[in-house]
Amino acid sequence: MDGYELGNNIELTVFDDGDMVCQMRSNDGNGVITSYQVLDGIRINYNDFHMSSFRSEFVSNTNMFCVDHCKEGRIEQEIKSGVYSYIETGDLRIDNRFNHNTDFYFPLSHYHGITIAFEVDKADASIKKIFPDFPVSVVILSKKFCHNNRNYFLRSATSIEHIFSELYNVPQEIKLYYYKIKVLELLLFLSGLEIDDSEIIKPYFYKSQTEKIKSIHTLITSDIQKHYTLEQLSEKYNISLTGMKTCFKAVYGDSLFAYLRKYRINKATMLLRTTDLNIAAVANEVGYNSPSKFSAAFKKEIGINPLEYRNTRMKR
């Protein structure tokens, strides 16, 4: 492709109108990027990944300015050797794709979001051609947010959520015109956004920390009938309590116990759908010695008790 190279591990289909579908496969899943050309040098990409990791071979041969919105899931990226950052639900990340030829990890084994990608010079020319008096320059925004190849993060901002939330459900017959409006709205918003240094220097974690956290995750999910205290895990993996709690939430999006509760309940829903085990047996299988505590936890997560859930699913 002009301006950038996607790599050899992506199967690309290009249509006559400039739209594209990129199919990506890894050892444990697949991903699809559905890309729409808004104007020359401006694309909106819908990202849907169901995998735990992917090696990106993306190389840009031109100046890029990209805005990523995470709708669901998480991305772990090695921003420099042995140092990792995370994009989580609701986050906005702005970068120039300088460090995109690297490994990406999806701790929850899925990721869904939107990327609005600008080839800087082409984008400005395209916008000026249609809207000569448009007051925002992509070149200037790129210098503002990506100076020295830095990344800018905006955490779960309600001020920008509406721009992206409306892009997830666009009627096919109006999409091209709607995309143009939303791109201009985004650029206007970014032009008025004050740079906050705390959003540039997003919390990051070293490989030694993340490896311990992933080992803890493997331990607690491999046998969910077993129970561990935070102190036991902290001592077993030689990591401070504070560091363990902070890093686990960064990697997996929830506190350790909240994550494990959801994991157990998700396992329980599968057992209720696919087996004839009674409620007490299901509770025991997912680590609850008390059926009443299991029912309370189940209802908190799912909204109905286990028996109601089973009866509802059996009727379908």
Image (cartoon, grey):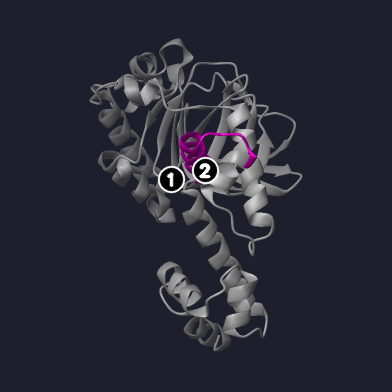
Quarter where residue 2 is shown? top right
- Name the foreground residue: 129 vs 118: 118
Regarding residue 138, the answer to whether it shows in the image is: yes
Q: Is residue 9 magenta?
A: no
Q: Is residue 237 magenta?
A: yes
What is the crowding at mark 1: few (fewer than 14 residues within 10 Å), some, or many (at least 20)?
A: some
Could you tell me which quadrant the N terminus lies in?
A: top right
Amino acid at the residue labelled 2: Arg
Mark 2 highlights which residue?
74
The stretch in magenta equals 236-252
The dot on residue 35 is none
Q: Residue at x 32, y 28 (%)?
A: 130
What is the crowding at mark 2: few (fewer than 14 residues within 10 Å), some, or many (at least 20)?
A: many
Labels 1 and 2: the sequence-earlier one: 2
- Name the foreground residue: 276 vs 196: 276
Q: Residue at x 23, y 22 (%)?
A: 133
Q: Position of residue 280 (x, y in %)?
A: 58, 82
- Name the foreground residue: 165 vs 228: 228
The secondary structure type at the circle numbered 2 is strand
Amino acid at the residue labelled 1: Thr
Q: Is residue 232 left or right of residue 155?
A: right
Residue 299 sits above or below residue 144 on the image = below
The reply to whether the C-beta atoms of the residues labelled 1 and 2 are less than 8 Å apart is yes
Q: Residue at x 44, y 28 (%)?
A: 203
Q: Position of residue 29 (x, y in %)?
A: 70, 49
The dot on residue 89 is 1
Q: Position of residue 206 (x, y in %)?
A: 57, 25
The secondary structure type at the circle numbered 1 is loop
Regarding residue 47, the answer to whether it shows in the image is: no
- Residue projecting furthest to the top: 148
Residue 168 sits above or below residue 156 on the image = below
